[in-house]
Image (cartoon, grey):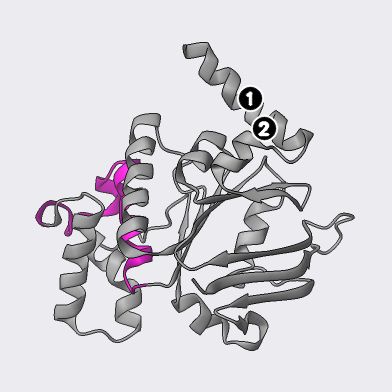
Amino acid sequence: MGVVVEFCDVVKRFPGAEENAVDHVSFQVKEGELITILGTSGCGKTTLMKMVNRLYEPTSGTIRVFGEDIMQTDAVNLRRKIGYVIQQVGLFPHMTVEKNIAVVPEILGWEAEKISERVTELLTLVNLEPATYRKRYPSQLSGGQQQRVGLARALAAHPSIMLLDEPFGAIDAINRTKLQDELSEIHKKGGLTCLFVTHDVTEALKLGTRILIMNQGKIQQFDTPQNILQHPANDYVESLLKSVMEGLSFFQ
């Protein structure tokens, strides 16, 4: 498996800040992995992810995507290879579901028939009946349905990498579980490489092939869920896991 994303001693400090938001971070993501990036609010996880598609630019260090230094590549071309899903969905309210999903394929000049087939395929993939939903507008959908459309839109042009920033954070528990299961299936079927930011330990353990745990801009541990549960690297990781274990024992 080739390396898809690589961070080499990357620092991000925002203007006027006294501390680094991301502090000398190095790691590799291999093809087909689903990496969950876990940590509390303000730990640097979203900043880390937004540097992959150059929404933020590193202060120092090197980020490579498919072996290329991203600062040497055109930002627009880079983003076309990367699907991006955020918590607020960001669907265009004046466009139908079909038009929302078709945005990037249309920019890329796909033929109408090919776009229509892709919309049908993607709505089926995210469990929204194409005939029922393609002509609806975002205001006619529930939060969970909007998030499904957001996921379909991000997948539309066959991206090589998916970035997901707390995509299910604003959704009720039942729909959240369903969406997690669907994302897992999509990941397995498509062999996609995904980076998924979350502050939910259970979500990180459930979805991640590996989990990157951050605190104060630094990586605390980067390993499989099993290894992290069995061998937490330090007190911070242990306390993070403990909160989940206590919650589980409450129901036993």
Examine the rendering and report whether any part of residue 197 can be seen.
yes
Q: Position of residue 76 (x, y in %)?
A: 51, 82
Q: Is residue 120 left or right of residue 42?
A: left
Seen from the viewer's position, the closer of residues 217 and 27 is: 27
Q: Position of residue 127 (x, y in %)?
A: 21, 49
Asked whether the beta carbons under mark 2 and mark 1 sit within 8 Å of each other, the answer is: yes
SS at badge 2: helix
Seen from the viewer's position, the closer of residues 90 and 202 is: 202
Amino acid identity at mark 2: Leu
Q: How many marks?
A: 2
Q: Position of residue 21 (x, y in %)?
A: 77, 56
Amino acid identity at mark 1: Ser
Q: In 3D space, how far apart are the residues under numbered discs 2 and 1 (Cα atoms)?
A: 6 Å
- Within 10 Å of disc 2 (Cα), the crowding (few <14, some 14-19, many 20+) is some
Q: Which residues are magenta?
A: 131-158
Examine the rendering and report whether any part of residue 93 can be seen.
no
Q: Position of residue 70 (x, y in %)?
A: 63, 80
Provide the residue designation for mark 1: 243
Q: Residue at x 45, y 76 (%)?
A: 81
- Secondary structure, magenta segment, majority class: helix
Q: Is residue 124 left or right of residue 8?
A: left
- Within 10 Å of disc 1 (Cα), the crowding (few <14, some 14-19, many 20+) is few
SS at badge 1: helix
Res 143 → quadrant: top left
Q: Residue at x 30, y 59 (%)?
A: 189
Provide the residue designation for mark 2: 240
